[in-house]
Amino acid sequence: MAFNQLSESEEHVLVNIAFHQLSRSEEHLLLNIVVYQLSGCEKHLLLNMAFKQLSESEQHLLVTIAFNQLSGCEKHLLLNMAFKQLSESEEHLPLNIAFNQLSGCEQHLLLNIAVYQLSGCEEHLLLNIAVYQL
């Protein structure tokens, strides 16, 4: 009854004081219970707010952990979605980095596959450019 007589800010202070009296595991349990009461949209908003409180390295670590929980197919889909957000020049950079991670044999195979996708005119132009590099 007395709690209900308090103003909203007084309730907030009292709840914070009580919360800090709990052990770490009790805090964790209480937060989980509260979060499960929220709608999907409220959970999403709360996670975004919490995520923004983290340092850049903590955010990076959390994203890496989350990414590693995904299936191969989900990772592939997420990377494709992220890749499509890049500008043409930004796309070029990760592709170059990825290409440089391949073995010489894999690079050769990938280039052959790429050349077979070209029209006769494009192949001819590419060969001319390559010859001028020699």
Image (cartoon, rainbow, N blue to C red):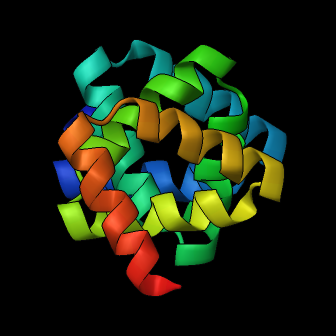
Task: Identify which residue is drawn at 20% across, 61% down.
Answer: 88
On the question of residue 55 being in view, the answer is: no
Image vertical order of residue 45 relative to residue 130, above or below = above
Question: Which residue is at the front of the view, 52 or 107?
Answer: 107
Give the total of numbered labels: 0
Q: Residue at x 26, y 28 (%)?
A: 42
Q: Is residue 37 above or below residue 46?
A: above
Q: Nearer the viewer, residue 74 or 25?
A: 74
In the image, residue 21 sits, relative to residue 79, either above or below, namely below
Left or right, 108 with respect to 41, comes to right
Q: Indicate left or right for 9 with 20 as reference.
A: left
Give the residue drawn at x 69%, y 49%. 108
Q: Quadrant of residue 27?
A: top right
The answer to whether residue 27 is left or right of residue 127 is right
State the image coordinates of residue 60 (x, y, percent, origin top left). 59, 63
Q: Is residue 3 left or right of residue 50?
A: left
Please state which of residues 17 and 32 is positioned toward the viewer in this rendering: 32
Quarter of the image with the N terminus is top left
Asked which quadrant contains residue 49, the reply is bottom left
The spot of residue 32 in percent (x, y) is: 60, 26
Using the image as rendered, state which of residue 134 and residue 46 is in the foreground: 134
Viewer can see residue 124: yes
Measured as percent of width and height from the top left, residue 40 is found at: 31, 17
Residue at 19% over, 44% down: 121
Whether residue 43 is situated above or below residue 40 in the rendered picture? below
